[in-house]
Amino acid sequence: MLLLKHLPTVREPRLYLSMERTYLSYLKFLFIAFGTGILSKKMILLLAALHFYGLIPFFQDLYKLLTWPVLILLFMVFYFFVRDLRYINRGAPVTAKEIQDPRIYFSAERTFLSWIRTGISIVIFGFVMEKFDFFLTKLALMMHRVITLHASFSGMSIIFLVLGIINIAVGLGGFMLTVYQVEHGAYHPHHKLYGFYGLSLLVCLSLLSYLLIKLSI
């Protein structure tokens, strides 16, 4: 995070792209951690149905560790991204010759692939969360036992799927804009895309917080 290091900055495309990749890595890690916390809650239901009570405290601790703390960290990542973006925007501009650098194309491709990886990871975890519900339902039928699944579980899976798709779409849009701007020698930060993604992320995080509260009641 640039602000914590107090580094000099310029409005250079590769700097913006590198910042995107850094924060996408944070997001991917934290969303996978949050999804693991939700799966831990489902494991508690499974273990209770199977009468394996010895492992339940472990998954309860895992659930507590990977839900609210991770959500708070996700909000913090969003906040620091905005701060770093403003910090870079205060830097000196670069010339058209510096913008039309072949290395920027490769940097744009790496950033696009990072968006894709993050989106696919979130989508896959959404599917895993949803399929685990299906597994628990079928297991309950086979064992003639009742496993009550909270409606919040399905809502969280849908949020993961939607956010993953948004990730891929925003990454594609950002890549196309970057290539177009570099070809014309005038790069501008994708503030509208950042704003759209930031708003989508805030909505998803708010919904996850709401569903987590309902799950805890």
Image: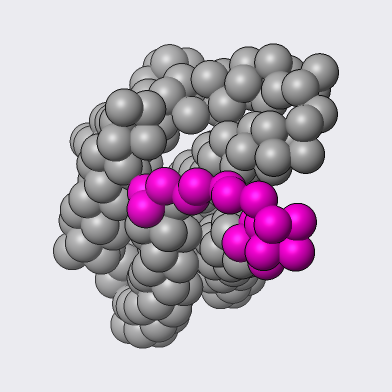
Given residues 210 and 113, the one toward you in this image is 210
Residue 203 place in picture, x, y as percent? 22, 50
Does the magenta run of residues contain 133?
Answer: no
Q: In this picture, which residue range is highlighted in magenta? A: 136-152
Observer able to see residue 53 = yes
Task: State which quadrant residue 123 falls in.
Answer: bottom right
Q: Residue furthest front?
A: 144
Q: Position of residue 151 (x, y in %)?
A: 37, 53
User: Which quarter shows the C terminus?
Assistant: top left
Indicate the quadrant where residue 154 lies: bottom left
Q: Is residue 17 above or below residue 179?
A: above
- Which of the pair 98/175 is nearer the observer? 175
In this rendering, is residue 11 above or below 66? below
Residue at point 43%, 73% (across, down): 165
Q: Vertically, is 81 above or below 197?
A: above
Q: Is 147 included in the stretch rendered in magenta?
A: yes
As drawn, 215 above or below 187: above
Give residue 115's position: percent from left, percent from top.
Answer: 52, 64
Residue 101 showing in the rendered view: no
Colouring mode (rainbow / by chain / secondary structure / one colour): one colour
- Residue at figure coordinates x 75%, y 64% from the top left: 142
Residue at 73%, 35% in the rendered image: 47
Identity of the residue drawn at 58% across and 49% down: 146
Q: Position of residue 166 (x, y in %)?
A: 37, 69
Residue situated in front as seen by the camera: 96 or 136: 136
Number of callouts: 0
